[in-house]
Image: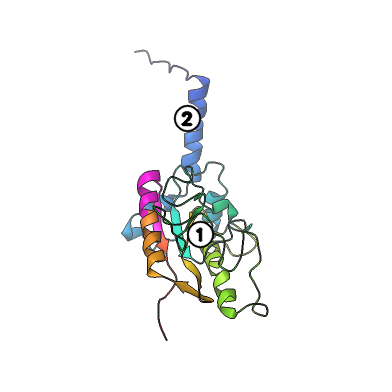
């Protein structure tokens, strides 16, 4: 009885096969278990998070978390690697939405624009106003969205590692100034949710969570 000699794979197919094997080896076992409720207690270790975060094989459809807040400094070194990039900006009823949508500014047939830098600033990379030069209401809200994005998806090793350093942050800015005070209007929230539903349907992104760490109250 003779055994079959395997036919050699073409160079490209062989490389693809090796890459696939490496990709499977680099993804820790806990990642495949996250969708199972019974495995929710088995949380990943920091070493495993770092391993996957630094993988040379990025996930094809990484988890996306929408941060609905005061805007995010998407140039911050701790999170800029994990800011969601829109492959088709301008096609989702929100101006040039490269990293998300500012739903506090609406116009005819538009849910907002793409200016998702922090409330109280004029561009990404600009420091938040200090409480000594501007009211504390702006100072406290300015950095809030960026802080949340860092807690979720920071990739900094020497500081605080985010809870999900393989996740991408999609920014939805819902805080704006009304009579000199930071406000979140119902229309901004509803437009933000509508924008996310459009993005998820049209772009087919792996949007898993909406973080909305704000309250609405009146004194």
Look at the image and give the residue range highlighted in magenta: 197-209
Residue 38: image quadrant is bottom left
Q: Is residue 199 magenta?
A: yes
Q: Look at the numbered disc 2 and give the secondary structure of its residue.
A: helix
Q: Nearer the viewer, residue 158 or 169?
A: 169
Do residues under tags 2 and 1 come within 8 Å of each other at their CB atoms? Answer: no
> Compared to 92, does 4 lie above or below?
above
Q: Position of residue 145 (x, y in %)?
A: 52, 66
> Compared to 197, does 60 lie above or below?
above
Which quarter of the figure is the C terminus placed in?
bottom left
Q: Is residue 69 left or right of residue 154?
A: left
| Number of the label disc, if any, that sits on residue 45 | 1
Q: Position of residue 184 (x, y in %)?
A: 44, 71
**Residue for point 55% across, 61% down:** 72
> Compared to 122, does 31 lie above or below?
above
Q: Residue furthest top?
A: 2
Badge 2 crowding class, 10 Å Cα cut-off, few under 14, some 14 to 19, many 20 or more, is few
Marks 2 and 1, the one that precedes in the sequence: 2
Q: Look at the numbered disc 1 and give the secondary structure of its residue.
A: loop
Mark 2 vs mark 1, CA separation in Å? 29 Å
Which quarter of the figure is the N terminus placed in?
top left
| Number of the label disc, if any, that sits on residue 195 | none
**Residue for point 61% across, 62% down:** 122
**Residue for point 39% across, 15% down:** 4
Q: Residue furthest bottom?
A: 219
Instruction: State how the image is colored.
Output: rainbow
Q: Is residue 115 magenta?
A: no
Badge 1 crowding class, 10 Å Cα cut-off, few under 14, some 14 to 19, many 20 or more, is few
Tag 2 residue: 17
């Amino acid at each position: 009885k003779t055994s079959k000699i395997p036919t050699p794979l073409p160079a490209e197919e062989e490389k693809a096969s090796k890459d696939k094997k490496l990709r499977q080896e680099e993804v820790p076992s806990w990642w495949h278990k996250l969708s199972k409720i019974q495995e929710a207690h088995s949380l990943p270790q920091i070493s495993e998070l770092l391993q996957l975060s630094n993988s040379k094989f990025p996930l094809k459809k990484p988890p996306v978390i929408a941060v609905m807040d005061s805007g995010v400094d998407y140039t911050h070194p701790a999170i800029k690697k994990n800011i969601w990039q829109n492959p088709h900006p301008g096609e989702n009823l929100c101006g040039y939405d490269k990293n998300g949508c500012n739903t506090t500014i609406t116009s005819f047939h538009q849910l907002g624009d793409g200016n998702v830098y922090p409330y109280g600033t004029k561009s990404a990379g600009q420091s938040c106003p200090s409480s000594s030069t501007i009211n504390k209401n702006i100072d406290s809200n300015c950095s809030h969205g960026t802080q949340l994005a860092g807690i979720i998806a920071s990739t900094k090793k020497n500081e605080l590692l985010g809870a999900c350093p393989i996740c991408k942050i999609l920014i939805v800015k819902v805080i704006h100034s009304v009579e000199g005070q930071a406000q979140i209007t119902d229309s901004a929230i509803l437009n933000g949710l509508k924008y996310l539903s459009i993005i998820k349907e049209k772009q087919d992104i792996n949007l898993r969570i909406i973080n909305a760490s704000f309250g609405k109250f009146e004194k």
